Amino acid sequence: MAQTPTSVDFEKIRNSSDGSFSGMLYSGFNEIISNNPYFAAGGGLMVLGTGLALAKQGITKSSGFLYRQMLVDLEIPSKDKSYLWFLEWMSRHKQRSSRHLSVETNVITHDNGSISTNFSLVPGPGKHLIRYKGAYMLVNRERSGKMLDMTNGTPFETVTLTTLYRDRKLFSDLLSDAKNLAIKAREGKTVIFTSWGPEWRPFGQPKSKRLLGSVILDDGIAESVEKDVKDFLSSGEWYHQRGIPYRRGYLLYGPPGSGKTSFIQALAGELDYNICILNLSENNLTDDRLNHLMNNIPSRSILLLEDVDAAFNKREQSNEQGFTSGVTFSGLLNALDGVASAEECITFMTTNHPERLDPALLRPGRVDFKVLIDNATEYQVKKMFLRFYENEEKLCQEFLHKFRLLNLQHVSTAQLQGLFVYNKRDPQAAVDMIETLQNPNTVF
């Protein structure tokens, strides 16, 4: 049966309105809805819901458009170098509002065995508000619960900065300030880097530069190494013109406690270089990762391979011999002077047992300069005594006389330093206690 079309009572619309056009429009809308069977059957609700959905979608798109036009974001992932710079800068920025903080604990072990602890509060995961050069910036530090850094098991993090589009140029200024703050904190200091997965990261706080004269080696040794290194650094063009790989390797060998590592640290301070320490015995260190690390050393850094004899005693390796390092001997040789080896690289290797090293490791191109850092000689004993006790020439001669009488031929500079530090203000006591040097394991 055909449905009768709905009729509209225009007379009723005109009488119920106030005579204005808007009033007639409103009355007409009510009349249509009330007399329309589709609206009465629920069709009106469907139309109204569709209208609201379209309105919501329009508002969402409009807000997104306004966000893109008025605001700008800067994302800093945790694997980027500027990530730590920014967190350090923000932790010191005074115009900051933070309700979420994280603690970073730094434990420092001093030469005398004492331990000091420093706590640093940095912005934790969450939202923070800062004001920089008159502009407000919303900082959101997010931690991913699904993505992990497989090298240390920590989740990846991201810091997102949001500000007005007109202030976007301040991002570059902010990052420059953060970088300058990090560089300033390292001025006059030596930064120690260690491998952290596929990258180098600072280990602890930067150390004060050690004076080269504070490490007493035998006559002429320190000067010869320093001269060779400085000559190498000034000869880059000479190497390139002759097609010679621009790298140089040094081997310091000798008994423990003779000052090998201390000299390298002092030399780095003299050159204004940092130190990258690589442990070849690390179980998860592979040939590929070794090659990658050695080709991505931070600029102005010395690569230090300590106790290389502990990682490779013989060229052949087997499980029966107990070698667990993931680095092969050929992998180390290729990293040192292979096709993919690093350019403009200074490598220092140390060992207590040079006789255990494979001759292939010692050939020129891998080790170019070898020097023995031996136990203390009379020259070193005199220099160290007068460095600790200035102007005590008479007591120094007495100390040297006893040193000869006791025939102390196997005393390390570390033992001497321990004796002098224990009697730091009493040179006579140091002379009286010289017999303690006969036992290398003496504990004061």
Image (cartoon, rainbow, N blue to C red):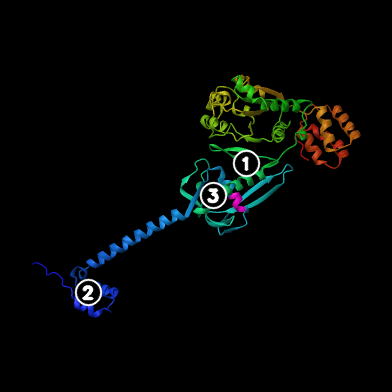
Residue beneath disc 1 = 203
Q: Nearer the viewer, residue 337 or 238?
A: 238
Tell me if residue 289 can be seen.
yes
Residue 203 in which image quadrant: top right
Assign the magenta stretch its main secondary structure: helix
Question: Is disc 3 surrounded by few (<14), some (14 to 19) or many (20+) residues within 10 Å?
Answer: few
Q: Is residue 199 magenta?
A: no
Q: Picture coordinates of residue 235 (x, y %)? A: 66, 24
In the picture, measured across the screen, residue 396 lies left or right of residue 120, that is right
Q: Is the residue under label 2 in contact with that under label 3 (CB below 8 Å)?
A: no
Could you tell me the amino acid type at mark 1?
Phe
Could you tell me the amino acid type at mark 2?
Glu
Residue beneath disc 2 = 31
Tell me if residue 440 can be seen.
no
Q: What stretch is highlighted in magenta?
A: 87-91
- Mark 3 or mark 1, whichever is nearer to me: 3
Q: Would you place residue 94 above or below residue 350 in this image?
A: below
